[in-house]
Image (cartoon, rainbow, N blue to C red):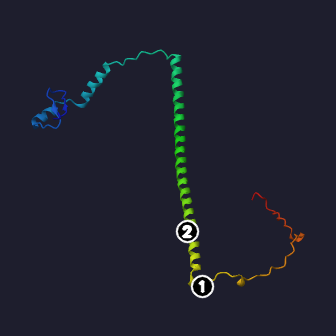
Amino acid sequence: MHQPNRLPNLNDSHAVTRGSRLPKQQAKKSLASKPAPSQSTTIGVNHLQNQRVRQLPRHAPAPVWLKSLLAAQKVSMVLFGSVFGLSLIVYGYTMHTQTTWRTQQDQLRRSQNQERQQGVMNEKLKQDLAKRAEAEGSGLVAPEPQMAVFVQSAAPRPPKLPTMAQAPKPIPVSKIPSGY
C-alpha cells in the first residue's frame, strides 16, 4: 500500500504523517515547538554561505581539425535539409501529376465510351425511322421522278469591285492623351 508522505519536524524527533490525525494536545504541542519562519530561513542561508562555488577548469580551445569537422557537419546538415525538402517537393509534384493524369485518363475513357454509345444510338434511330417510313400506314410516299420539282437558277450577278467610297474610314484621333 502507498506510504503517506512524512513531513519532518525540525525541533521534534517525531515526524508527522500527512493525512494522519493527532490528538489536539499533541497538535498544539507540535505547532508550538516549530521555529518561526525567519529562524528556519537563516539556518538555510547560513548553510549556503558556508559552501563555496568551485570554478571549473578552463579547457584549451578546440583544435582546428575539430572546428573544421563541426563546420562540415553544419554545412552537410544544411545540404541534407535542402535535398530533403526538394525531394519532398518533387515527390508531391509527381503524386499530383499522376493523380491528375489518372483522372484525365478516366475522363477520356468515359467520353470515348459515351461517343461510341451515341453513335450506336444514332444508327438505331436512323434504322427505326427507315422502318417506320417503309411501313404501310406511315403516310410517306417513295420518291418518283415525275413528282420532282425543278427550280430555274437565277442569272449570275457581276462581281462587286470595291470603290473609293467604300474604302475603310480612318479612325478619328482623339485629343485626349492615350495615357488617360
Residue 61: give x, y in percent of width and height.
49, 16
- Rendered view: 66 above or below 25: above
The answer to whether 20 appears left or right of 177 in the picture is: left
Q: What residue do we see at 54% from left, 28% from top? A: 75
Inter-mark Cα distance, 1 to 2: 25 Å
Q: Quadrant of the N terminus?
A: top left
Q: Which residue: 53% across, 47% down?
A: 98
**Amino acid type shown at disc 2:** Met
Query: Quick one: label 1, few (<14), some, or many (20+) residues within 10 Å?
Result: few
Q: Which mark is residue 96?
A: none
Q: Nearer the viewer, residue 168 or 92?
A: 92
Q: Position of residue 157 (x, y in %)?
A: 85, 76
The residue where tag 1 is placed is 139
- Percent of width and height locating residue 138: 57, 83
Image: 137 above or below 55: below
Quadrant housing the C terminus = bottom right
In what element is the residue under mark 1?
A: loop
| 70 relative position to 151: left or right | left
171 and 94: which is toward the camera: 94
Give the amino acid at mark 1.
Gly
Q: Nearer the viewer, residue 136 or 129?
A: 136
Residue 174 falls in which quadrant of the image? bottom right
Q: Residue at x 31, y 18 (%)?
A: 50
**Which residue, given by chain and number where applicable, does mark 2 sit on?**
121
- Mark 1 or mark 2, which has the lower sequence index? 2
Kindly indicate the quadrant of the structure image that contains residue 7: top left
Q: Is residue 145 left or right of residue 137?
A: right
